[in-house]
Every structure is written in structure tokens, then in C-alpha cells.
Image (spheres, grey):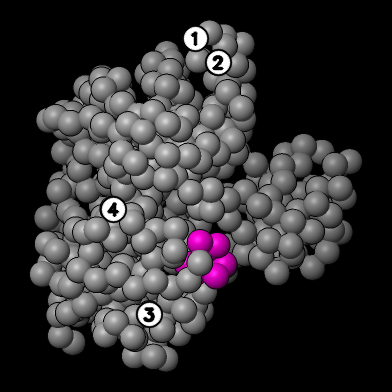
């Protein structure tokens, strides 16, 4: 297979800019697919070519498989990069690219289907002896769920097999709650995914969310770039990510890293993937959670501590060049932290705050990286995700990286829209965060009640 010549980028915002720049570095022409709302975006200014795929509404542009693939064909692209979000995990897009002779920069449609279904991925993890929490396969009825829950013990999680983002998921504390939770989870999953299938797992209290970045090529080579900690979340949405995970036992690190390589290898997977795990500090164990068959928002922290450019590796793999690194080449150096800056109002339950950026000045300096598509005068549209930027700070150790991040957030200057920058600064200053003494529900159960009780400090 020849090296890629021209790539359609079927996404927007900071990830579109990120892929455009990676294409430039690989001497590949970039074509950006844009909606009417994004004609003047930074990505559109930087790309070699721009093609409009429809109106502002995502359903009529970025989420329309036919329009996206047609844009690749009409602009003469030999490949398509889906970024993250939108169509990036839709097997339909990968299949349509295959049918039209366009290289999909990611896994095959079949690998995506197998990895994207949580129950199927869980079964594969069990088959490959990866660590998993007690639970079931797909359940036929509420009665089956009740029997499994009784066997493994409450509390349990009901989870949608086709789920994501916390939809179709319910925590059940006792048998009395099961019927109502089953009906809610099934209905939500059916409405969100057109697939109401559920399974059950043991609920892990005070869990840490730890994931492994993996890359695989067409020759069957698979490498992992170490772990990331994504425990600081709100309603299953990640707020802060860091690499490597703080104070993770070496045995657990090796266990999940090896399991991630086995999983991706078994799928004949090409491109970037993330294998996610829940770590149970009380038991000192880890349990497989899911596979994300795409580039993750938090990939920069893995890049910083390994020196491996994940997006460039994706381009190389898709072009048939294979991985440029082997496992022995990958060494974790230092510590990196990423904070997502969103156009949201934390004081108003994180409501989106679209508007015009009157001022935008990103922090700069040694050990600071900012991935963003913002500039003064840019209109933050109400149609899309509210992510404005990712600030990545690093240092020789976690303490230094935290200090550098707090300094960087203090240097960010933005006006015209409300953002989560001040909230993030307060979050990273909390003693529990500094000590690494947090879990996936900590923000909602501990930090937000404290933060909301001091409105003057939160302003």
C-alpha cells in the first residue's frame, strides 16, 4: 500500500486542527469537511482544502455518513480521518469507506462492531484472561438480572451493551430497586441506541478509571503507550486526565497493559484504541470496562510522556507503513496532566455558554501544550460539543506537573463566554486531588457540594 496522499478530516474544533497539522508533518494534503457554521474555523484556515458537507445541524452534516464519504470522493481523497465523537465509532462509516475505496483511518468495520458492543468485548476479555469484574453476558429478562445480582451481591450496575456516556446505565443498591432500574436502563438504551440489551456487573465503590493507549498495525504489531488516569469525572464525562496513573501498583499496571495488547491483537485492530479499566483500591484489583475504537480526547498526555505522536502513527498505519516504534522503544518519562476547558457555566450546572470569543490568549511556555481551535472573534456555536481547548502541562513528576498546570490555567485569558477554567483551577488545588485520594464519583459527592457552598470563591 502506498503512503497516503490526501486525507479528508471529518471533524471540527481542536481535533480537526490537530489532524491537519499531523498531515502537514507527514507531507499529506489535508481536506477539511465543514458545516456552514465552521466555514471560518481555524481548521478551515489551516487545511489545504475545504469542502462543505451541509448546514450547521450535526445530523445534516457531520453525522451524515453519505455526505461525509461523498466529500472524500469528490475532493479526491484516498483516506478519511474521523477524529473523535460524531461518526468516529460508527461501523457504518468504516464500511461505507471500504465500499467506496476510501481508506478509513482506524479499525475495520468488523473490528469496530466487536469492540464497540460492551457485552461482546467483555466476553472477549474473559476469553483472553483479561481482568474483569463479576457479572453477566447479555440478559434476556429482569428475572435473569435479579438472579445474577443476587449471586454476585449488591450493589450492581445495569449497563447497556451498546451504551456510552453513562446512558442506559443504572446503579442498583438493593433487590427492591431492580425492577425500576431495569425499566429505566432498558428504555434509555432503546431510545439512545436503538438497542435495549443490558448486562450486569458488580458495582465498584470508590473506583479509579484507568485506561491504556494502544496502537496496532496491519502486520499484527501491537504496542501500548502506558496508562492514563481519568478518574476525575462528572456524570461519566472526564474533566482531567493524567499519565501515568498516580501510585498505581506495578503489578496492576503490567496486568492491564498486557491485557490491552492481547485484546487489540485478537481483534486484528489497526490504528489507535483505548482499553479502559476500573481499578478497585479496596481489593487491589482491576476490571475491564470497554474498548474505545478511536482516538481519545486525552491522547496528548500519552504523547507527552512517551514522545510518540499518536495521530502521525495513525496516518502511517493507514498508509501501510506500519508502526514506527516497537514496545521496547517506549519509555515513560515524567508526568503529564490534561484539563478540558469547556464553554460552560459551572455555577449553572455546567450549562453551555455559546457566544463570541472577545478575548482568547492561551498559556505558553516550557512544559505547556494547548490543543485548541480558538481565536478572538470566533463564534462558539450552540450546535456542537462545548470543548474549547485542552491544556496539557508536564513535569518530571506529578507534583511538578500539577504546579505547572495551575500556573498555566492562571495565565489563560478568555472573555465573551463563560468557561470551566476557574472551576478546574479550584479542582486541582483541592487537597484530595493533590494527594490522589479521589474516585469516579468524588467530584459529584465531595467537591461540587463544597464548591457550590462557597459561591464567592467559585465566581
- The N terminus, quarter of image: bottom left
Other residues around mark 2 within 10 Å, as few (<14) / some (14–19) / many (≥20): some
Of callouts 4 and 1, which one flags the residue occurring earlier in the amino acid sequence?
4
In terms of secondary structure, where does tag 4 sit?
A: helix
Distance Cα–Cα, label 2 vs label 3: 46 Å
Distance Cα–Cα, label 4 vs label 1: 34 Å
Q: Is residue 115 left or right of residue 26?
A: right
In terms of secondary structure, where does tag 3 sit?
A: helix
Other residues around mark 4 within 10 Å, as few (<14) / some (14–19) / many (≥20): some
| Image depth: mark 1 or mark 3 in front | 3
The percent position of residue 78, horizontal first and vertical second, equals 26, 83
The percent position of residue 178, horizontal first and vertical second, equals 83, 47
Q: Which mark is residue 42?
A: 4
| Image depth: mark 4 or mark 1 in front | 4
Residues at discs 4 and 3 in contact (Cβ within 8 Å): no
Distance Cα–Cα, label 1 vs label 3: 49 Å
The percent position of residue 344, horizontal first and vertical second, equals 51, 34
Amino acid at each position: 500500500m502506498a503512503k497516503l496522499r490526501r486525507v479528508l478530516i471529518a471533524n471540527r474544533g481542536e481535533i480537526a486542527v490537530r489532524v491537519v497539522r499531523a498531515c502537514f508533518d507527514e507531507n499529506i494534503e489535508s481536506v477539511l469537511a465543514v458545516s456552514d457554521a465552521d466555514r471560518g474555523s481555524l481548521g478551515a484556515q489551516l487545511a489545504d482544502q475545504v469542502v462543505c458537507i451541509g448546514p450547521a445541524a450535526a445530523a445534516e452534516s457531520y453525522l451524515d455518513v453519505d455526505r461525509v464519504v461523498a466529500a472524500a470522493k469528490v475532493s479526491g481523497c484516498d483516506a478519511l480521518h474521523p477524529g473523535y465523537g460524531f461518526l468516529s465509532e460508527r461501523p457504518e462509516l468504516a464500511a461505507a469507506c471500504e465500499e467506496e475505496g476510501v481508506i478509513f483511518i482506524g479499525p475495520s468495520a468488523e473490528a469496530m462492531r466487536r469492540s464497540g458492543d460492551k457485552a461482546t468485548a467483555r466476553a472477549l476479555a474473559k476469553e483472553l484472561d483479561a481482568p474483569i469484574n463479576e457479572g453477566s453476558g447479555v440478559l434476556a429478562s429482569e428475572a435473569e438480572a435479579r438472579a445474577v445480582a443476587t449471586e454476585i451481591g449488591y450493589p450492581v450496575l445495569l449497563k447497556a451493551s451498546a451504551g456510552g456516556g453513562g446512558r442506559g446505565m443504572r446503579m442498583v443498591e438493593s433487590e427492591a430497586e431492580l425492577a425500576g432500574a431495569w425499566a429505566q436502563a432498558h428504555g434509555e438504551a432503546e431510545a439512545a441506541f436503538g438497542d435495549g440489551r443490558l448486562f450486569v456487573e458488580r458495582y465498584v465503590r470508590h473506583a479509579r478509571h484507568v485506561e491504556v493507549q494502544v496502537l496496532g498495525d496491519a502486520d499484527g504489531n501491537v504496542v501500548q503507550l502506558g496508562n492514563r488516569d481519568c478518574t476525575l469525572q462528572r456524570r461519566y464525562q472526564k474533566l482531567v486526565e493524567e499519565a501515568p496513573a498516580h501510585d498505581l501498583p506495578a503489578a496492576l499496571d503490567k496486568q492491564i497493559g498486557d491485557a490491552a495488547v492481547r485484546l487489540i491483537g485478537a481483534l486484528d485492530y489497526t490504528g489507535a484504541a483505548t482499553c479502559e479499566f476500573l481499578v478497585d483500591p479496596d481489593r487491589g484489583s482491576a476490571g475491564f470496562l470497554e474498548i474505545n475504537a478511536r482516538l481519545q480526547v486525552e491522547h496528548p498526555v500519552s504523547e507527552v510522556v512517551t514522545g510518540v505522536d499518536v495521530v502521525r502513527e495513525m496516518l502511517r498505519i493507514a498508509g501501510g507503513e506500519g508502526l514506527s516504534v516497537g514496545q521496547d522503544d517506549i519509555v515513560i518519562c515524567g508526568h503529564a496532566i490534561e484539563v478540558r476547558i469547556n464553554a460552560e457555566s459551572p455555577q449553572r450546572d455546567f450549562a453551555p455558554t455559546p457566544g463570541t470569543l472577545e478575548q482568547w490568549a492561551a498559556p505558553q511556555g516550557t512544559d505547556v501544550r494547548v490543543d485548541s481551535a480558538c481565536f478572538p472573534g470566533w463564534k462558539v456555536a450552540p450546535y456542537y460539543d462545548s470543548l474549547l481547548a485542552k491544556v496539557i502541562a508536564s513535569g518530571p513528576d506529578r507534583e511538578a506537573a500539577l504546579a505547572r498546570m495551575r500556573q498555566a490555567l492562571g495565565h489563560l485569558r478568555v472573555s465573551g463566554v463563560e468557561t470551566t477554567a476557574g472551576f478546574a483551577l479550584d479542582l486541582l488545588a483541592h487537597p484530595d486531588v493533590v494527594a490522589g485520594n479521589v474516585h469516579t464519583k468524588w467530584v459529584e459527592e465531595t467537591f461540587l457540594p463544597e464548591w457550590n457552598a462557597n459561591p464567592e470563591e467559585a465566581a
